[in-house]
Image (tube, rainbow, N blue to C red):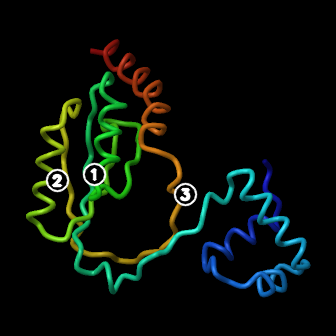
Amino acid sequence: MNLTNKDSQLLALLQRNAREPIASLARQLGVSRTTLQERIKRLEANGIIAGYALRLGRCLNRSTIDCFTLAAVDNKSYADVGRQLKASPSVQTVYVVAGEWDLIIHFVAETLEQLDAELSRLNEMGGIIRAVSHIVIGTKFDRNIYRDGGSTVSHEISEAEQVNDERRRRRSRHT
């Protein structure tokens, strides 16, 4: 589905405040309420709008510890690693990346002890070849823009398996 300029404007407004009344959004976009409602239904039906979520303020999250872990994964273990990571409530997001590492895992923990336990579980997980963790000590700014969380880790990992297989084949040819 191709997004129109109005679609993009609507998405930006909804990202700022998904609870904005339809009448207010329609006025800002210069369209009727009915037209706007139909546009939103079309965006939802086509999977552009995957849902609406609550974003917690930083005042509530202030006591949490954020950790980003880079992990290299054995090719044969992608699906199993994805399932295990998805089952962990401390894992907020898993990114599949190209380069030396395969995954960037975002952990959130209440205490250093909880984070240590999560990282120990990760290091004991079958399929993890190596990992390195970086604990966030401060935030310079946060645009507070959240992407669709609807895609699953297993799906993302499955798509990345082909890319990583090819990358590893190229690496082994050079060594």
Q: Residue at x 31, y 50 (%)?
A: 105
Q: Residue 134: which quarter of the image?
A: bottom left
Q: Which element type, helix, strand or loop, lies under badge 3?
A: loop
Residue 118 - label: 2
What is the x, y in percent for residue 90?
27, 59
Q: What amino acid type should be assigned to the residue bearing mark 2?
A: Glu
What is the x, y in percent for residue 142?
42, 75
In the current view of this chain or complex, which residue is farthest to the top?
173
Indicate the quadrant containing the C terminus: top left, top right, bottom left or bottom right. Answer: top left
Measured in 3D between alpha carbons, the distance from the residue under mark 1 to the one under mark 2, in whole angstroms, is 8 Å
Question: Tag 2 or tag 3, which sits nearer the N-term?
Answer: 2
Along the horizontal axis of the image, is 36 left or right of 82?
right
Question: Tag 1 or tag 3, which sits nearer the N-term?
Answer: 1
Circle 1 packing at 10 Å, graded few (<14), some (14-19), many (20+), is few
Asked if disc 3 and disc 1 are in contact, CB closer than 8 Å, the reply is no
Q: Which residue is mark 1?
A: 88
Residue 7 - label: none
Q: How many marks?
A: 3
Circle 2 packing at 10 Å, graded few (<14), some (14-19), many (20+), is some
Q: Which element type, helix, strand or loop, lies under badge 2?
A: helix
Q: Residue at x 73, y 85 (%)?
A: 21
Q: Which residue is mark 3?
A: 148
Q: Is residue 146 above or below residue 170?
A: below
What is the x, y in percent for residue 112?
11, 66
Question: Tag 2 or tag 1, which sits nearer the N-term?
Answer: 1
Along the horizontal axis of the image, is 14 left or right of 35?
left
Asked if disc 1 and disc 2 are in contact, CB closer than 8 Å, the reply is yes
Measured in 3D between alpha carbons, the distance from the residue under mark 3 to the one under mark 2, in whole angstroms, is 25 Å
